[in-house]
Amino acid sequence: MEKTAGKWWDKLGKPQYGGELVIRANRDIVNFDPYFTETLTSIYGAWMERLVADDWTVDPAEWDYKITWHPSKYLKGQLAESWEFKDPCTHIIHLRQGVRWQNILPANGREFTADDVVFHYNRLYGIDGGSPSPYRTTDVRLKDLISVTAADKYTVVFRFKTLNPENIIETLHNAYQAQCLENPEAVKKWGDLTDWHHAIGTGPYI
């Protein structure tokens, strides 16, 4: 019988639980809200998640994530379970079911839904008649985004001007921090998430 190959990380030894995680970044962390800046690249992902994220099961010998741009084959669904194109300018994302916001007021651990994705993109880019984020004018990656709607509780529909699926994939699936999704109830209660006490996400850290 052929022996099954192990994972690349097996050579690092048995995982040890506990300890301390140290992140070094040349950033002035002045707020905890992706609406104001996407430059806090080393901190947002701790408590907020994206639709698509880096696939850390990829062997660093194959791809080491040392540059900002990541080929789509080295990304995987995080809050998204799957995705498809209805046509060249319509990208549909199906969300994972059962994902919950952290059990902190005012989110109270409720389920993450498509309406939360719609809230994020409308707020960040002023799509639905709202005021766009302060850095919207310099963020050309989503300049062709027309609308974001919830087809149902777990389905989000993105409509773009461009008829370029590859560009849409690189835009929505890339790992930059504007994709980190904040809790709508927290924003509505406090106005923004500048104070770290108000930073609520679906991620592993509180």
Image (cartoon, helix red, strand yellow):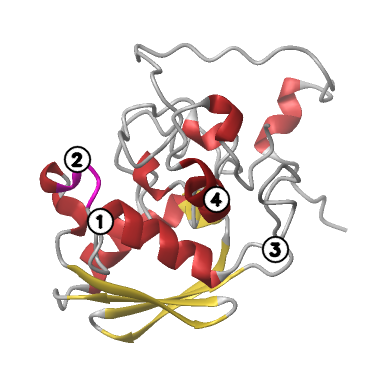
| Distance of label 1 from label 2 (alpha carbons) | 9 Å
Q: Is residue 134 magenta?
A: yes
Range of the magenta residues? 132-136
At x 49% / y 57%, what residue is drawn?
Answer: 51
| Distance of label 1 from label 4 (alpha carbons) | 16 Å
Q: Which amino acid does label 3 sit on?
A: Glu
Q: Can residue 16 be seen in this view?
A: yes
At x 39% / y 45%, what residue is drawn?
Answer: 175
Determine the secondary structure under disc 1. helix
Determine the secondary structure under disc 3. loop
Q: Give the label on residue 197, or none.
A: none
Asked where in the image residue 47 lies, by quadrant, the reply is top right
Q: Which amino acid does label 2 sit on?
A: Tyr
Determine the secondary structure under disc 2. loop
The residue tagged 4 is: 183
Q: Nearer the viewer, residue 64 or 45?
A: 45
Mark 1 or mark 3: name the one nearer the start of the chain: 3
Q: Which amino acid does label 4 sit on?
A: Asn
Q: Give the label on residue 135, or none.
A: 2
Q: Which of 106 and 140 is in front in this view?
A: 106
Image coords of residue 10 (percent x, y):
75, 31
At x 18% / y 47%, what residue is drawn?
Answer: 136
Image coords of residue 56 (percent x, y):
57, 40
Q: Give the label on residue 125, or none.
A: 1
Tell me if residue 146 comes above or below residue 186 in the rendering: below
Image coords of residue 138 (percent x, y):
12, 42
Q: Give the label on residue 111, or none.
A: 3
Q: Which amino acid does label 1 sit on?
A: Tyr
Mark 2 or mark 4: name the one nearer the start of the chain: 2
